[in-house]
């Protein structure tokens, strides 16, 4: 590691909402919520917010909030459906720009990444200038804004990227990590949610400085999770800020607009979700053996079932066939459901079954070609007949 602060954390500002405002310039400057809409463009009240624009955040709207609650806070908010393929395009474009400058880019989601500028003093003597250059190119080429935090550790870089949002750069000199964090409320630390914040408040700890000053012997008594937070509050990286581990599973689920016991509708929804799972598996070059299903009843009871295939697969068809079998075993076919989900795990080397290898290979190749068509012409370019009514 270089002796200077050399970790960037780049965070795209209100990413989904910013992309929507770019796609429809009439939305710029207006409070918008990215969530679920029905085929007629009307918001789905039981959905949750994926992202709120900064104009909507002024009213208290935030990601993960139920849509109906956000609309109570800001009745004039405009609800738009997400354009996931556009988010992927924008994300790829942004991190391609980052790769022009950073020797290493660790992307951790569609809208954020760590950039490692270790040992680049001769090439980039002034990292603040580089941060501003990256931001300018993102704004010019992609049409959205980013905020960047620069520090000697990842945890401080991540916290500092929020410091001057939106469209800001914050630099924390090496050796000043603890003093930078000290006055901030503990909720600013990654890993501290509302319940954890309340827990620490009861212990008399309200700022990161107060958390950092708790004697280690006392912290140990609170458990390993508290030790990780304590290390972060002292500006030190821990298990949360090592390079991203390999994906262990891929899954998708969806809450219905209305509870349903319509088998055709539920199977169509399962097919739709499996299409997403299969596409992600093939894009990530993953192959898994354990297919699992989750259903949720109207009383919020959730039950799951899984089964291990005799071979690894990334085929939508094979994942769906097992998912349909599990669904029919798990559900009585009468009690209304609120949610259905499907996923696959136990990734590893592809193990071919002994028979019909050629047929499976042809099917998988066809699905890969469909993936390419969707990438080029949009997710609706090729749609199975069974899910068209959705």
Image: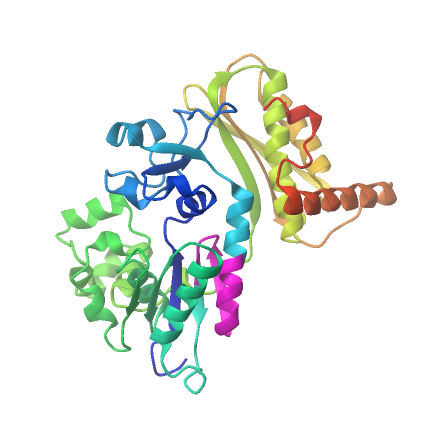
Q: Is residue 182 above or below residue 324?
A: below
213 horizontally vs 38: left or right: left
Compare residues 334 and 116 and report the one nearer the observer.
116
The C terminus lies in quadrant:
top right
* Residue 214 visible (yes or no): no
Of all residues, the one furthest to the bottom in this rendering is 122
Tell me which residue sits at (62%, 41%) in the image: 378
Residue 189, how many percent across, how many down? Answer: 28, 56
State yes or no: residue 89 in magenta.
no
Tell me which residue sits at (43%, 34%) in the image: 80
Of all residues, the one furthest to the left in this rendering is 204
State yes or no: residue 98 in magenta.
yes
Compare residues 157 and 19 and report the one nearer the observer.
19
Tell me which residue sits at (53%, 46%) in the image: 86
Compare residues 386 and 311 and report the one nearer the observer.
386
Residue 371, how many percent across, how many down? Answer: 68, 45
Residue 200, how many percent across, how many down? Answer: 19, 50
Residue 338, how many percent across, how many down? Answer: 47, 22
Tell me which residue sits at (25%, 43%) in the image: 194
Q: Is residue 278 above or below residue 323?
A: below
Magenta segment: 93-113
* Residue 342 visible (yes or no): yes
Colour mapping: rainbow
Q: Is residue 71 above or below residue 343?
A: above
């Amino acid at each position: 590691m270089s002796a200077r602060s050399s970790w960037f954390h780049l965070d795209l500002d209100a990413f989904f909402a910013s992309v929507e405002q770019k796609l429809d310039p009439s939305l710029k400057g207006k409070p918008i919520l990215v969530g679920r809409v029905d085929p007629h463009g009307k918001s789905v009240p039981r959905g949750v917010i994926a992202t709120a624009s900064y104009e909507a955040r002024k009213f208290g709207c935030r990601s993960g909030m139920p849509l109906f609650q956000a609309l109570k806070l800001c009745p004039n908010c405009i609800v738009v459906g997400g354009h996931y393929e556009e988010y992927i395009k924008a994300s790829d474009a942004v991190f391609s720009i980052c790769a022009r400058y950073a020797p290493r880019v660790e992307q951790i989601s569609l809208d954020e990444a760590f950039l490692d500028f270790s040992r680049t003093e001769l090439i980039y003597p002034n990292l603040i200038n580089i941060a501003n250059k990256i931001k300018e190119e993102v704004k010019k080429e992609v049409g959205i804004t980013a905020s960047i935090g620069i520090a000697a550790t990842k945890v401080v870089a991540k916290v500092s990227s929020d410091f001057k949002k939106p469209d800001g750069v914050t630099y924390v000199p090496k050796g000043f990590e603890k003093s930078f964090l000290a006055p901030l409320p503990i909720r600013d630390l990654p890993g501290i949610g509302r319940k954890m914040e309340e827990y620490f408040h009861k212990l008399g700890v309200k700022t990161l400085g107060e958390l950092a000053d708790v004697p280690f012997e006392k912290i140990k008594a609170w458990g390993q999770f508290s030790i990780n937070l304590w290390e972060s509050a002292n500006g030190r990286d821990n298990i949360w800020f090592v390079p991203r581990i390999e994906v262990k599973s891929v899954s998708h689920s969806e809450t219905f607009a209305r509870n349903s016991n319509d088998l055709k509708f539920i199977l169509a929804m399962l097919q739709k979700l499996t299409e997403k799972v299969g596409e992600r598996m093939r894009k990530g070059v993953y192959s898994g053996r354990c297919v699992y299903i989750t259903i949720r009843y109207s009383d919020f009871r959730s039950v799951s079932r899984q089964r291990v295939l005799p071979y690894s697969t990334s085929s939508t068809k094979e994942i769906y066939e097992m998912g349909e079998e599990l669904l029919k075993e798990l559900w009585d076919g009468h009690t209304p459901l609120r949610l259905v989900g499907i996923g696959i795990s136990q990734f590893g080397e592809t193990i071919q079954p002994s028979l019909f290898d050629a047929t499976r290979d042809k099917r998988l190749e066809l699905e890969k070609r469909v993936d390419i068509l969707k990438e080029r012409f949009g997710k609706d370019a090729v749609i199975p007949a069974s899910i068209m009514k959705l």
